[in-house]
Image (spheres, rainbow, N blue to C red):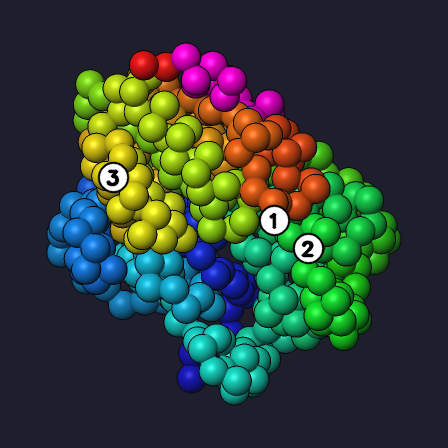
Amino acid sequence: MTPCATTLAFVESPVQLLNVLEWAYAYGTHPPGGTPLLDGVPSQAARTAGRTGLRSGGRRGASVAGTPRAAGGLRIVVLPPTDPMSRGQLRRMAALARDEGYEVRWQEARGSRLAPVRALAALTRDVRAAARIVVGDPFSRYVQLLLTLIRAEELVVVDDGTATMEFAAQTARGERLVRWHRIGRGGAAGRLGELAYAPVSSAARRRFTPAPGTGRRVEVFTSMPVTVHGSMTLRVNDFAWTRARFGPPRLTRGTDLVGTSLVETGVVDAAGYLDAVRALTVRHGATRYFAHRRESAEKLRVLSGATGLEIVRPDLPLELTARRGPIGRTVVSFPSTVVHTLPYALTGTGVTVAVCDVDPAWLAGTASPRAQGFLAGVTETARDVRRIRARTLHTAG
C-alpha cells in the first residue's frame, strides 16, 4: 500500500493542476533535476475537435518514462468533471505532473449517483492522515465536504482563476461561499438546496478563515490581486515553473484572441459576444481564436464563419500553450484569468497582453447583478496589460 502523503492536493480543472505544480515549485517540494519539457507532453486526441473540424493546439511528443512517486511528500488527486475537453486537458496535465515525479491519482467523483460516495470512502483515510491540504476550488461542494474530514493544520488555496478574488472578498466579509456569476440566481429550488447544504458550507467557511490562536494556517497562492485577512498568508504565483520548463515561444506577426465561457455561464449575450469578437478581429487583424475549454462547438462554428478566425482548442492551459508557442505578438482577451496570468507566464518574451472590457449592453438577462462590477474589477486590477474600451469597437472597420 502506498504510504499516506504529507501533502494532499485536490484539483478539478487543468488550471488548478497547473497551479498546484507552480505551488510545489515555489514551495520547494519539486524533485531535483527537472529539465525543460518542450516536446515531452503526450498529445491526447481531441475527439470533440475532430468531430467539429476544430484544430487541437500543442505539439506531439513522447512521454518521459518514469515511476510516479509522492515527490516532496505531495500527492495530487484529480476529481475530474464530466465534460470531454476538461478531462482531456486534465489527462495531459496529469502526464506532466507524473513526468515531474509526482504521484497523481485519478478519482471519479461524478457521473453517477454513487460516484461521490465511493470517492469519499476511497479518500477518507488519506484526507485524515495528511498534514497539509491543497485545494484548487474552495467553492466546490465536493471539496467543502472533504474539508469536514481533515485534521491538517495547514490549508493552501491555489488559483481557480478569477474566482480567487471573490473567495478572498467573501471570506473577509464572512459571507457564504458562492461563485460570483451565481449570486442572485437559482430560484426557489436553488435556495432549498443551499439551505440543506448550509451546515457543510458553514463548516468550510470557518475552515478557510480560522481564528488567530487556533494553530491552523491558511495560505492563498495566487496571481490575482487579492488582499488576505485574519490569519491568512499570501504567496504570489509568478509562474516560475512554467517559465523554467517551457519556451521562450516563437512569436508570430499576428494577433491572437482568447475566448471566454461568459456566454456559456449566462453572463454575456451570444449576439453581443459575436459582435465584439468580429470587431476585435477587424480592428486588430486577429487570425486565431484560442477557445475556452467550456465553449460550445456550435458557438465556435458561428464565430469562425462570421470572422474567418482559425479556432484552436488548446490541449493544455493557455499559459502553457502560449509559453510553448507559437503565439501572437499581441494577445487580446475579455476580462478573465489570463489577463492576470499571461503577463507572468510571458515575462520577457515581447508579447503584449490586452484586455477588452465588457460593454453593459452585452450582458444577458440571466447575468448576476454582481457581473458588471466583478468583470470591471478583473479588468481594472490587471497588471502590465493594454486596455481596450468596448465602446470604441463600434468604430472599427
The local secondary structure at tag 2 comes to loop
Contact between labelled residues 2 and 1, with CB atoms less than 8 Å apart: yes
* Dot 3 crowding, Cα within 10 Å, few <14, some 14–19, many 20+: some
**Residue, x 60% and y 23% (percent of image)?**
380
**Residue, x 36% and y 23% (percent of image)?**
279
Q: Image quarter for residue 131?
A: bottom right
Q: Image quarter for residue 194?
A: bottom right
User: Which segment is the magenta one?
Assistant: 378-395
Between marks 1 and 3, how big is the CA–CA gap?
25 Å
Q: Amino acid at mark 2?
A: Arg
How many numbered marks have been drawn onto this rendered protein structure?
3
Q: Which mark is residue 304?
A: 3
**Residue at the spot of label 1:** 366
| 100 relative to 256, above or below | below
Foreground of the two, 292 or 192: 192
Q: Amino acid at mark 1?
A: Thr
**Residue at the spot of label 2:** 185
